[in-house]
Amino acid sequence: MKIGSMKYKKGSMGCGSIIIALSLLALCVFCGFGCGGDTGGNDSKDGSPVDAVVVADGGHEDSSVDSWVDSSQPLDGDAPDDASLIHEDATPQDGEIEIDGSVECFDTVYMKTTGDDGLDGASPATAVASLGRVQEILKAEAPECEVDVRIEQGVYSGQTVIWDYYHPDYKVKFMPIDYHGGGIGSIDGRPVFDGLGASYLFRLNVSDGEPTNIEFIYLRFEHYQQYALHFAGNRNDFDNGWNGFNRVFGCYFYEIGNLASPGNPGYGALDLVNSIENVIRNNHFNKNENISSQAGMMHSVYLAHGSRWNEISNNQFHDVSGDPIRARDYSNFNDVSDNVFFDTGSVAFYSDWWCDMSQNPNCTKTGGECPSWENEFRSNELHCGYSGGSISTFHYFQGATYVPAWCDDHLSDGWARLYTSGNSKTCP
């Protein structure tokens, strides 16, 4: 099977299958009525790609979308206040409390800068200090309900965690301790995770082909070298090795990359590898920068290796040394819309690159990489590139029509590489 012939399937996932079916139906209906005024089915009118630029593999870690929109989520402003779930059972389990004969699920873990990882995190008085300890607690409790991880304001220094706990039916939500569904003005600021130069804060190391349902709400990440958040599926198994249905809302990504944290180059403040159906909304990406010799390798949102059906909307991007949105290796059907970009991008605001093993000896993926298809870049406000000059709206590094022999040529299927419309450009 050629790499490009991959079909996304979820098996018997119930509600998740319905969501995907509706998403695909929406895509079919949408494209049937024409997409963004593109001509020829492969190029957009509102940017001029420059195809002479050549880059190496870029060192992106070998870790192993028609947009989905949850109608319960706001387009802008407040995030919802999801009520705790209570399940019925005859006997209280460990970590649960019996109240009037019913059982309340272990649904909250507390974190404080003054917390103690020897405690259970079940109350503010017994708060823990680290994300690693939160994961230990959740694995021990195995709650059958949504969980709020409530984080007191303050600075959490040098933390890093490889996260593999999830429940395919319930969310784990990381949020400020005083967050109850209002906007940023309703909380006493964002809790801060300062990496002090660490490689990353949170690596979601799951590739089971199930929803992972992790949410980050109104948190600040700064001074991480390679990425702040990394949703790492299996890049070699697009069908069954994904994670997804995560959400990043109202967060602040500040000074991510090796300009502020010397060492290995940064790749993406938010780095996705075979991660699908994520919502990335209302965030700030500010000073996501590498040193000048590696500037183009740093992106704010890196959609890599089969990352599909993601929504990137209503975000602000400032001072990003590489192209702020990068698609790589069959990362299809992603929707990038209603964002604002200031002084971002070395070549374009959106770029598509993949490692061509016929030309680049540094490519490492068995079977090769492929172009990305059917992405959308619409209604974005574009203000100058990283150097202060005008740059293209979009760019395909290997050209708009080149498809290697090991990939399916979707141009013959009528697929577009990218649809654009409604973008505005201002660069004095």
Image (cartoon, rainbow, N blue to C red):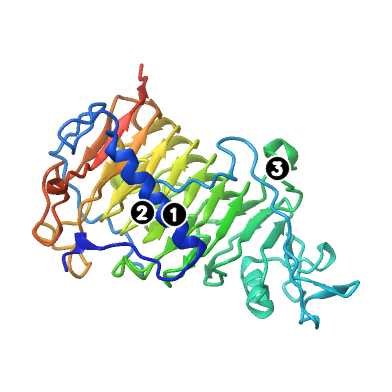
Residue at x 69% of width, y 60% of height: 148
> Of the numbered discs in the image, which one, if any, rests on residue 277?
1
- Residue for badge 3: 189
What is the x, y in percent for residue 266? 39, 53
On screen, residue 38 above or below 309: above
Camera-near label (3 vs 2) is: 2
Amino acid type of disc 2?
Arg
Q: Residues within 10 Å of mark 1 (few under 14, many from 20)?
A: many
Q: Position of residue 340 (x, y in %)?
A: 45, 30
Tell me if label 2 and label 1 are in contact, CB under 8 Å: yes
Q: Is residue 90 above or below residue 378?
A: below
Answer with the quarter of the image where residue 89 lies: bottom right
Q: Earlier in the sequence, mark 2 or mark 1?
A: 1
Q: CA distance from mark 1 to mark 3?
A: 28 Å
Res 308 label: 2
Q: Considering only order in the chain, which callout, 2 or 3, is on the residue closer to the N terminus?
A: 3
Q: Nearer the viewer, residue 381 or 146?
A: 146
Which marked residue is nearer to the observer: mark 1 or mark 3? 1
Front residue of 320/424: it is: 424
3D distance between C-alphas at marks 2 and 1: 7 Å
Residue at image x 19%, y 35%?
43
Q: Is residue 391 visible?
A: yes
- Residue contact at pointers 1 and 3, CB within 8 angstroms: no
Q: Residue at x 37, y 19 (%)?
A: 426
Tell me the residue at 39%/39% (across/down): 336
Looking at the rendered structure, the kind of residue marked 1 is: Glu
**Does residue 371 lie above or below 314 as drawn?**
below
